[in-house]
Amino acid sequence: MEFRVTRSGAALIGFWVILAGAVVSIPFWSLNAVAALFWLAVWCVVCLCVLVPRWASCRVRVGGNHLTVRRGLLFLVTKRMPLRFISGCHILQTPVGRRMGGCVLVLIASGTFTVIPGIRRADAEQLAAKLSHGGKLL
Amino acid sequence: MNGRRFHILYCLRLFRYALLLCLVPMVQALIAFDWTSLFTALKQDAAILLFFLAVSLVRWYVTGFALTQDSFEAQTGVFVHSKYTFSKSSVAVLEIVRPLYCRLLGASRVTLYFHNYAAPRRFQCYLTKRDAQALADLLMPVRQDHSIFSPTGYEKLSFVMLSANVITACAFAWVSLDRIQEVLGDSLRQLAWMQFEQIELLVERILPAGLAALATLFFLVGGLTFLYAFLHTAGFRVCRNGGIIISKGGLVTKTERRVRLRCVSACDIRVTPAGRLLRRYPVFIAAGSFTGGEVPLFVVKKGQEARVEALLPGYSKPDGPLCDPARKSPVQYLWKPGALLALGLALCGVAFNVLPGVLPVLAAWVLGALGCMIVSLEGLRREGLHKNENRTLSVVFTRFFTRHEVCVLTQDLAYTLFEHPFSVSEGRCDVTVCLPCRMRYKARGVLQYQARSIPFSL
């Protein structure tokens, strides 16, 4: 059983992150508009060229005993959690995300948690259903 | 709920802030011999105290706890009631601490640490001494306790030295100084500073100026740390009964800790510089959300690590190779201490020409960086992980001056593997093991195929 984050889902999260950057930059517009615009442009480039491809590269694999989340293009991070010790599974949805069928999935296990932004809602719900049965039933 | 209440100290935590608020203007007026101000301050203090007392009493009246056959129920809150029910099996560690002020009032501070990853991760309350004992006997009953570790003589000295924690002792001293200063004014800090300067002048007769200050500070902090450690470890002993480990001791602050054996998630033997000198290593354990505390569970003599099994039956030393040093990257291990060492040496070079007086202080820096580098070199040779035949996981890693030899006993683990382009090409990765208590053990340069084959059903 393997899920992957969709490009549109990752792009949507990227849009929200860019929007958050724009909101943070509002107080600086009156001080130095050119500098604020420059840093906002840098933030957009970082989001679109680094963060969104990184999120889009995320793969979730559910094995017999454990769940593996793998992400990254150059710097690969693989996180493995035992299925029976995953104690929380949160699905966060925004109105736009709901229309696009995407969501943010947060998995909480012992002493750690992982955030999977931009996963398809149907996949997240399927995973949640599996986890709610202790990883035994689907 | 059978209506038993917490010790009044539980609610008087609010009241002590009121006491501080009252004391400061009163003492100031007394020192200035201003009787009019004193009477005004007394009136204000009375009003503040009455208000806080009323709030505390209401809080105390509505909170309570009950002991049922196999659970502990607690209720807190005035307007918003929170009711907690903790079953016997959910408690991993029970800690009863009795500082001097609690002992004077007949109270005990009880902290429960839980086994499962859920909220709250721990619960703290004040109970009377008898209730605390009843709670401990209900949640973790002990019929007879055979002492396994009760240090005497040289063992006791090494236990005190290995329990010394500079950061905790300094923080404790600083807070105490601040509290006393709130009452007595700035005079205490000035007095301490004057004493420090006098000792420094004395040391300056033997050592150069900069190094004298450093040496004085070192001995002062060391003295404080050892005093703190001595007070906390006096009369310390560890016992095991059935599935419970009990450790108790302390002179001014008495501490009793009961750990459920099946909840122990990791056992960490820390090879510290002091431990290397004394040839004895402190052993810490993590259980549920409990991270090990300040005082080690006991100390073990070099070469006798197997003695840990007497306390933790599941413990095992690594029964195979932890790593392949030939395939590791020395740069990964040595760049941090190497950079510190290079910077220290460069500064020494500059100081040699410009300011020779600073050289002894910089030499201390260089020695520290050198020590760090030696430990990192040891890490290059030893750091890694290995799955043992008795279904435990051994992790060895170095951090600053200390080598940690960890035996992970739980299956409730999460792993993070980190790879970058260079490590991928050489088939290595860094593995971080996450425990339920949020402690993380990071082993660098683990072979990729080994890291990927770590099974969860250990």
Image (spheres, rainbow, N blue to C red):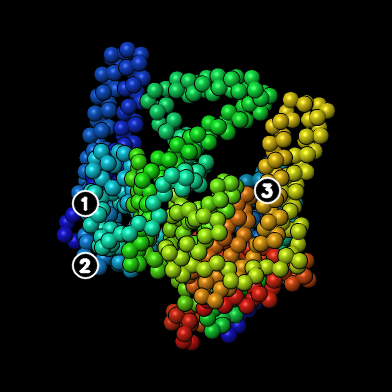
Q: Are marks 3 and 2 on the same chain?
A: yes
* Distance between the alpha carbons at the discs numbered 1 and 2: 17 Å
Q: Residue furthest left?
A: B2
Circle 3 crowding by C-alpha within 10 Å: few under 14, some 14–19, many from 20: many
**Is B421 situated left or right of A83 in this image?**
right
Task: State the residue at coordinates (25%, 38%).
Answer: B104
Q: Residue B84 is drawn in which quadrant?
A: bottom left
The spot of residue B273 in percent (x, y) is: 60, 47
The spot of residue B445 in percent (x, y) is: 70, 65
Q: Which residue is mark 1?
A: B130
Residue A113 is labelled as none
Q: Amino acid at mark 3?
A: Cys
Task: State the residue at coordinates (78%, 34%).
Answer: B348
Chain for disc number 1? B
Mark toward the start of the polypeptide (1 vs 2)? 2
Q: Amino acid at mark 2?
A: Gln
Q: Secondary structure at mark 2?
A: loop
Q: Which residue is mark 2?
A: B69
Give the label, 3 or 2, closer to the camera. Answer: 3
Q: Which residue is mark 3?
A: B372
Q: Amino acid at mark 1?
A: Arg
Give the label, 3 or 1, closer to the camera. Answer: 3
